[in-house]
Amino acid sequence: MTVFTNEHSDEGKKAQQKLWDRKIKGYRCATLQFLWLETDTLVYAQFERLRGNNELFDSEDRCPATGHIDCDNAN
C-alpha cells in the first residue's frame, strides 16, 4: 500500500501526521519520505503487509452500519 500527500495543503499536513502516528494492523511502515518537486513537496509512505497475517482489520474496526473499514479507529 502506498500513500502520497501534498505537504503544503492543510489536508496534506493532517495526512502527514496521521502517517507518522498510524498503526495499520497487518502492515508495517517500510518507508516515509519527502519528495521535493519543482512546484510541490509530496510525502510518500509505503506500507508492507506482514507475513502470516490474513485478517488485516478486526471486526470491531468495521463500521457496524456499512461493514466498511473505519480507518480512524483501526489500529
Image (cartoon, rainbow, N blue to C red):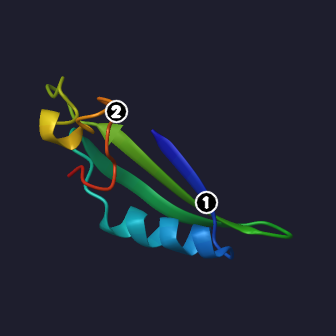
Amino acid type assigned to the residue bearing label 2 in the image = His
Disc 1 residue type (three-letter): Thr
Q: Residue at x 63, y 72 (%)?
A: 7
Furthest residue in direction right, as rendered: 38
Residue at disc 2, secondary structure:
loop
5, above or below 24, in the image: below
Which residue corresponds to mark 2?
68
Give the residue displayed 29% in from the left and 29% down from the top.
67
Q: Quadrant of the N terminus?
A: top left
Q: Is residue 9 left or right of residue 19?
A: right
Q: Nearer the viewer, mark 2 or mark 1?
A: 2
Give how far across and how far down residue 37 sits, in percent: 78, 66
Q: Position of residue 38 (x, y in %)?
A: 85, 69
The residues tagged by marks 2 and 1 sit, at their Cα atoms, a distance apart of: 23 Å
Q: Quadrant of residue 23?
A: bottom left
Q: Position of residue 15 (x, y in %)?
A: 50, 65
Task: Answer with mark 2 or mark 1, whichever residue precedes in sequence.
Answer: 1
What residue would you read off at disc 1? 5
